[in-house]
Amino acid sequence: MTSPAPSAPAALRDFSVADFDFTLPTELIAQHPANERSASRLLDASGAQPADRIFRELPSLLQPGDLLVFNDTQVVKARLFGEKASGGKLELLIERVLLPHEASDGSENEVVAHLRVSKKPQPGGRLHMAGGLDGGGFDAEFIGRWPDEQGQLFRLRLQGPAGETPYELMQRHGHVPLPPYIEHADDTDDERRYQTVFARVPGAVAAPTAALHFDEGVLAALDARGVQRASVTLHVGAGTFAPMKAERISEHVMHHERYAIPAATVQAIADCRARGGRVVAVGTTTVRTLESWARSGEVTGDTNIFITPGFDFRVVDLLITNFHLPKSTLMMLVSAFAGYDPIMALYRHAIAQRYRFFSYGDAMLLRKI
C-alpha cells in the first residue's frame, strides 16, 4: 500500500457529516471476536508506509520509554428486561449509576437509563425488572427525566433484596450490552471477550474496544521491550453508538461521559515527556480523557469533548484504535488525529483487504499529523 497523500489544512475545511461516510460490506462487520485476542489484524500507519500486520507485533513497533495509556473501565451487564405494573414489556439500558451527591435522596441506588417501552411511566410508577422484587428480581421506581425535564434519559431508584447495589443487581440479572450492529444475543463468550483483560472499575456500557486485542502475552512483550504502562478511567456510554442527526459537524452536541485520571498517570506522562518517549493512547476513549484533562486541568469529572479536524492534540502522539462506523464522531476524531485524506485512504485499503470492522474487529496504529 502506498502512503496516502497529506491532507489539506483541516481547519480550512467546512466538513459535513456526509464527508465521513463510506460504504462497508455488511460481511466485514465482525459478529464475534478473533479466536485469540492478539491474533486480530493491525493496520500499521505509524511509519512512512502503512503495512498489514498482526496485533501481537505491536511491541516491536513501539520504542523503549514509550508510554501506553489504557482505559481500565469495566463493562457492566447494563441491559435489563422487565415490565410495568400493567404488564407492558420494557427494556432498560443503564447508562450510569449516580454518585450520592448526584442522587435526589443522597443514596447509591439511583441510576440513569435509556428506557424502551410503549408508554413512559409516570413519576412514582414502579417497573418490575427480571421478575420484580417478589419474583426474584428487583423493582425500579421511576423518578423522572434526566438531566432535566427535557432530557432524553430517565432517572430511576432501584430496590433489590438485602440492599444489593445497582452493580450487584446488574451482575445478577443483566445482559452484556452488545452494540446494535452485533446481531446475536449475548452469551458467556461475550461476558469474557467484550471485556479487557485489565478491566478494573465498573461503569461502562460499551467496551474500550481497541484494548480488547491485548492479552497477557502482548503485555509481557511490552514490558520486555521497555514500554511503560498507565491507566485512566472513562465509562463509555451508549451515546458512542448514537447516530449524528446534524448535517454539519459544528451543529452536533456530544454526550457526556465520566472520567478519572490517577495521580500516578499524570506523573507517568510527565516522566515520559522528560525522557523523550511517546504517549500512546489505547483507544479513542483514552484520547478523549487525556485531551479533556489537558484543556480543563481537571483529573476527574464529566467530558463532552468533541474532537474534529483542526483539533490541537496536546498529549497523545500515537493512537491504537479499531475501525469506526461511517459518519460517526469517532471517524471525525481519527481524521483529526491522522488527517482526513489519510484516514479515508486507510479505510479504503482496509475494506479492500477484508479487515474486520467495529467492536470485535481489527485495529489500526496511527501517528499524529
Image (cartoon, rainbow, N blue to C red):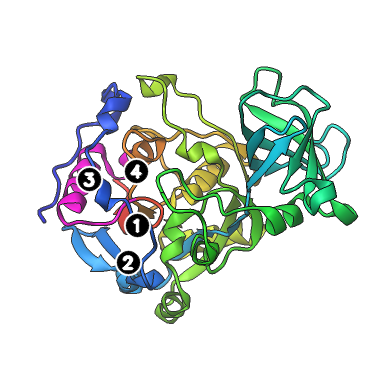
Residue 361 disc label: 1
What amino acid type should be assigned to the residue bearing mark 2?
Answer: Ser
Q: How many residues crowd mark 1 within 10 Å: few (<14), some (14–19), many (20+)? A: many
Say if the magenta span includes residue 349. Answer: yes
Q: How many residues crowd mark 3 within 10 Å: few (<14), some (14–19), many (20+)? A: few
Mark 3 vs mark 4, foreground winner is 3
First in sequence, mark 3 or 4: give its number.
3
Find out whether the residues at labels 2 and 4 contact each other: C-beta distance under 8 Å.
no
Report, in whole angstroms, how far the alpha carbon at label 3 lies from the one at label 2.
19 Å
Q: Is residue 221 above or below residue 313?
A: below
Q: Secondary structure under badge 2?
A: loop
Find out whether the residues at labels 3 and 4 contact each other: C-beta distance under 8 Å.
no
Residue 10 disc label: none
What amino acid type should be assigned to the residue bearing mark 3?
Answer: Pro
Mark 2 vs mark 4, foreground winner is 2
Q: Is residue 260 above or below residue 154?
A: below
- The quarter of the picture where residue 56 lies is bottom left
Front-lying residue, 47 or 17: 17
What amino acid type should be assigned to the residue bearing mark 1?
Answer: Gly
First in sequence, mark 3 or 2: give its number.
3
Mark 3 vs mark 2, foreground winner is 3
Find out whether the residues at labels 2 and 1 contact each other: C-beta distance under 8 Å.
yes
